[in-house]
Image: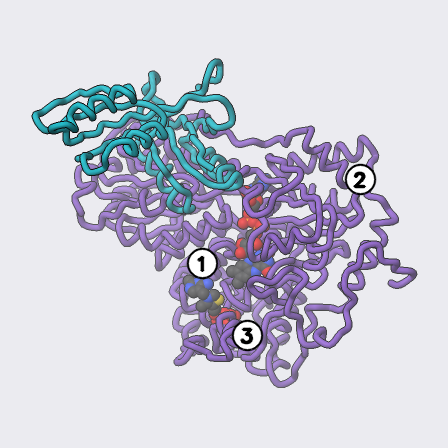
Chain colours: A purple, B cyan
Amino acid sequence: MQISGAEILVRSLQEEGVEFVFGYPGGAVLEIYDAIFRQQQFKHVLVRHEQAAVHAADAYSRSSNKVGVALVTSGPGATNAVTGIATAYMDSIPMVVISGQVSTPAIGMDAFQEVDMVGITRPCVKHNFLVKDINELAPTIKKAFYIAASGRPGPVVVDIPKDVTQRLAEFHYPESVSIRSYVPVTRGHPGQIKKAVNLLAEAKRPYIYVGGGAVQGNASAEVTELVKMLGVPCTNTLMGLGAYPGQDQQFLGMLGMHGTYEANMAMQYCDVLIAVGARFDDRVISVPSHFLSQPKKIVHIDVDPSSIAKRVKVDVPIVGDVKHVLRDMIDLLKQTGQQVPQQHLANWWKQIEEWRSYNSLLYTPSTEFIKPQYVVQKLYEITGGDAIITSDVGQHQMWAAQYYPFKRPKQWLNSGGLGTMGFGLPAAIGAQLANPDAQVACITGEGSIQMNIQELSTAKQYHTPVKVIALNNRYLGMVRQWQEFFYGTRYSESYMDALPDFVKIAEAYGHVGIKVENPADVEPVLREAFSPALKERLVFLDFRTDQSENVFPMIQNGKGLDQMDLPPHMRDLQIAPFENNRDYGNMC
Amino acid sequence: MRHILSILLENEAGALSRVVGLFSARAYNIDSLTVSTTEDPTLSRMTIVTHGSDEVIEQITKQLNKLIEVVKVIDLNESDHIEREMMLIKVRATGKDREEMKRMADIFRGRIIDVTEKTYTIELTGTSDKLNAFIEAIDRSVILETVRTGASGIGRGERILKI
Ligand SMILES: Cc1cc2nc3c(=O)[nH]c(=O)nc-3n(C[C@H](O)[C@H](O)[C@H](O)COP(=O)(O)OP(=O)(O)OC[C@H]3O[C@@H](n4cnc5c(N)ncnc54)[C@H](O)[C@@H]3O)c2cc1C
Ligand SMILES: Cc1ncc(C[n+]2csc(CCOP(=O)(O)OP(=O)(O)O)c2C)c(N)n1
Ligand SMILES: [Mg+2]
């Protein structure tokens, strides 16, 4: 039986086991919306702006093992989606975005709501397709899901002209897909794995640096096993948080621009570094030449060969899927009984404990102002450290990363690579739909939340009871911090004048809003928000936080990992410079 | 350093723009680019001449391989290879220049493929260097027009780029 292209699309999505499609209708996709109307298998989530559809689909992926799907119309719908697509691309998130296109004969005619979606998104997708032939539609959807989720994951755009959705054809969904020009590697080269293990067996100051690839690659168990069996220190990037349990003694915290003192010092002074699904980002290692000025051997495990040797030359590249490569490394270690030399390791830990003892995340408590760090710490306590946390971009994002020690992967969802303000709320909605029983909180700023605040309406419609934790400092805080440090406190356009009454906004959308101005109220209000009485409600907590608070430690542009700007309490300390072969005696 | 990359890619709409887009997005250099289908109509073969440090060339190769439609990439510089480029050059050929131009074309093993009272059009094939040398060797002021194909390359002997 012949069915329409729109029906073929819908059937294909059903074949892929899609649960939710996040989207927004328009002329070019009306046929598709009609086919959606006539089916029950998946649910459509009507957002209030296409950017939000894409962020929600992205977070649906980030917080599950499924591929999120977004659907937008041609022209402005498509361009509105671009920020969301680029966000997912930078963080290697699997996703399929379907965009409507004008009918094939109209393509190139400057038709109403025509944009070259394939052209616009080319630099920010893993791959994209324009489907001109209805017989190619089902195979293309199959390919799109396969490409999005395999290898280094990423977003795939499928642009479908309106006439293709209207034409008729038989529906056959391919059972499997193979693309001769696309064959991702999974197993690492055994010779390279052996070299890596041998390096560890000679290491004096080993360090495991784990990134988003371990989260995406579901390799948290392997990471933890390896770190535990070796007894070595471990750090996570912003994207890797949760890949290793945040409360564990062997965890040194996040590293990088706003990483802990110990995590950054260890990164600079380790002698054998195992990089696991992490890409030596400029916000992590800062200046490559300074990072490498302290000699170290580097093993780099990554599924994407182009991530390897992009910013730093490495000694042992291992192309493969983290889960497989780590499993092979663990097996080899067990088989050979090789270990990290214990005496050196003990010394290394002494050095690390000394660095850790300075407590670089210490902040000055206040009974007058609400400290943003305190809010995050209380949130951690009250949610038992179990909530899925989304965030926006700015100081609040860094405080969330620093003060909520994530227990498990896929618990922390944020835009790291693109740094997209406006990600947090739609992401929380997507994550809540993917994890209906989880507590989901969005840590945001009064600047960021306003970039997609209209999604409070979507949250109402779909009963996603996320808790919005606004750390409202009345500033574009991260911008203000840079202006304080680098632009002589000239706060150019970083003060948010005429802020709305967020409590009223929340209420207007049908939610609960609470303003918190007193530090003593932080805990009780958080308890109330997470109490059974408000379990089914979206609660918007407007915390008026200390306006002058800054994020520390901080590595300024051009500075090295061991050249952090430190929090006030560490500035006058006499910290001994790192010394190779130092005798630590019996300290610690 | 100058490198010649040989790329086998799916003969699909949009594949070429992905390659070109990659070079501009990542600020890589393209000195020349040629592309055409192969004996297998589903495949195109592209030759890109580029230059950059070893690290940059390594990244270019990896990024090209990452494109879904790219089947294979080789850097011809890694072993013996042959490179050819074709140029059509139209020159003013009058008076005593006419004889001189014919002589130069012969020296460079070029062929005069179109003749008018005042002009010659010469077809010249060789490495890009040879074509450059020809342009250097003749009087600039007589050149009316040049068209070059850009280099294509192929490995010597048994070295074959195929799927
Ligand atoms: C305001 C702000 C401040 C920031 N400060 C910091 C900071 O202090 N510290 C910090 O770390 N970041 C910080 N970032 C984030 C930073 O910009 C980068 O996004 C982040 O560091 C990249 O993380 P990653 O190296 O883990 O790589 P990701 O972007 O997560 O990339 C993952 C890597 O793993 C690979 N991979 C994916 N799947 C697999 C698999 N299955 N097997 C093997 N490999 C795989 C990919 O190819 C890729 O190379 C900040 C961002 C913002 C917006
Ligand atoms: C879409 C977008 N525009 C601009 C920026 C630049 N930017 C980064 S952080 C920031 C300030 C964020 O302010 P707010 O949400 O209030 O968070 P705070 O830093 O105050 O915690 C800005 C403007 C960005 N990351 N994203
Ligand atoms: Mg703010």
Q: How far, Cα to Cα, is label 1 from label 2?
A: 46 Å
Task: Specify the subunit that label 3 lies on.
Answer: A
Q: Are marks 1 and 3 in contact (CB under 8 Å)?
A: no
Residue A390 in sight in this render: no
Residue A111 % position (x, y): 17, 47
Q: In this figure, which residue is indicated by the disc labeled 3?
A: A485
Neighbours of disc 2 within 10 Å: few (<14), some (14-19), many (20+): some
- Mark carried by residue A426: 1
Q: In this figure, which residue is indicated by the disc labeled 2?
A: A201
Q: Is residue A281 above or below residue A530?
A: above
At a point 60% along the width and 79% down the height, the residue shown is A370
Disc 1 residue type (three-letter): Pro
Q: Would residue A225 be found to the left or right of residue B78 on screen? A: right
The residue nearer to you, when weighing A280 against A335, is A280
The residue nearer to you, when weighing B98 against A439, is B98
Q: Is residue A575 above or below residue A111?
A: below
The residue nearer to you, when weighing A299 against B151, is B151
Q: Is residue A468 above or below residue A231?
A: below
Disc 2 residue type (three-letter): Ala
Q: Are marks 2 and 3 in contact (CB under 8 Å)?
A: no
Tell me which numbered mark, 1 or 2, is placed earlier along the sequence.
Answer: 2
